[in-house]
Image: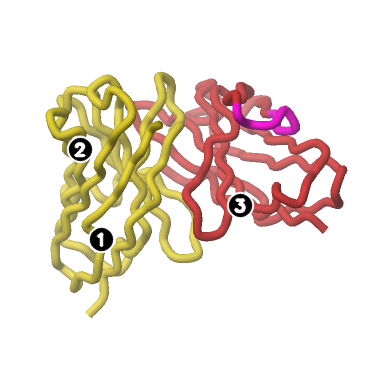
């Protein structure tokens, strides 16, 4: 049950794209397509942004997209906006009804 | 609207116990898995425990096994987390979350802070 590895921080200017990686193992990220991503603003509860690797809940802007290759999942934010500045966490099913989160990535809009 | 409201957090001494509650509304509580997730101050999210719709199956992160117990009362639309033998490492905001039909958490409460300190 080790945390998935994410970069500590990524940054971009408004309108640019940023990609956050989430690296695990074949026991979690690589073994299942139950990957989700959460956005968390300071002092707030997390918000679901992506589920099942690449599906977006209806209220999430289509600037957010997810993908997976092998043991690494990715979240891409296209057309970066000021309100996207937040912490982002990936989460993967890890078998036996357990889940594991990533270490978290701070996105800064320059 | 779906609402999850946690309560029961506070200051507790090392070795002590605390029971968290989560009141659910706006959805059919007894048809969803429920989850506790915690976040230590300035740290990342950590999945803590899951419970099946009827309470028959429960799963925990290794660090809380034998100390924490997740439970639910479907008649009261409520989720609980009994925490025993608490240590400083358990200091965190504890979130109640609804697990969707798959393995993601589609609704979250606002969290309740547990501080373990003498």
* Left or right of B91 in this view: A53: right
Q: Secondary structure at mark 3?
A: strand
At label 1, counting other C-alpha atoms closer than 10 Å, the crowd grade (few under 14, some 14-19, many 20 or more) is some
Circles 1, 2 touching at the beta carbon (< 8 Å): no
Indicate the position of residue A108 as horizontal and vertical percent values.
Answer: 74, 56
Magenta part of the chain = A59-65
Residue at 54% of width from left, 32% of height from top? A36
**Host chain of mark 2:** B
Q: The chain coloured yellow carries which letter?
A: B
In terms of sequence position, does the residue under pointer 1 or pointer 2 come before the other?
1
Residue A53, placed above or below residue B50: above
Check chain identity for marks 1 and 2: say if they share one: yes
Residue B66, placed above or below residue A98: below
**Near-viewer residue (B89 or B81):** B81
Q: Which residue appears farthest toward the front when viewing the image?
A: B1
Residue that mark 2 sits on = B78
Q: CA distance from mark 3 to mark 1?
A: 24 Å
Residue that mark 3 sits on = A87
Q: Quadrant of residue A65?
A: top right
Indicate the position of residue A58 as horizontal and vertical percent values.
Answer: 60, 24
Residue that mark 1 sits on = B9
Colour chosen for chain A: red
Q: Secondary structure at mark 1?
A: loop
Q: CA distance from mark 3 to mark 2?
A: 29 Å
């Amino acid at each position: 049950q080790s945390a998935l590895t994410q970069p500590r921080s990524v940054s971009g200017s408004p309108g640019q794209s940023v990609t956050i990686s989430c690296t695990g193992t074949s026991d979690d990220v690589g073994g299942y397509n139950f990957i989700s991503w959460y956005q968390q603003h300071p002092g707030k509860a997390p918000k679901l942004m992506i589920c099942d690797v690449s599906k977006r809940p209806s209220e999430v802007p289509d600037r957010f997209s997810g993908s997976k290759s092998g043991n690494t999942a990715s979240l891409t934010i296209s057309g970066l906006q000021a309100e996207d500045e937040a912490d982002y966490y990936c989460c993967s099913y890890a078998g036996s009804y357990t889940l594991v989160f990533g270490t978290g990535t701070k996105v800064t809009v320059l | 609207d779906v609402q999850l409201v946690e309560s029961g957090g506070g200051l507790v001494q090392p070795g002590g116990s605390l029971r968290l509650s989560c009141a659910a509304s706006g959805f059919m509580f007894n048809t969803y898995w429920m989850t506790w997730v915690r976040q230590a101050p300035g740290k990342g999210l950590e999945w803590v425990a899951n419970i099946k719709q009827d309470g028959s199956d429960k799963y925990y992160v290794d660090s809380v096994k034998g100390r924490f117990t997740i439970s639910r009362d479907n008649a009261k639309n409520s989720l609980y987390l009994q925490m025993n033998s608490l240590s400083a490492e358990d200091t965190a905001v504890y979130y109640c979350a609804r697990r969707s039909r798959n393995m993601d958490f589609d609704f979250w409460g606002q969290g309740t802070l547990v501080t373990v300190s003498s």
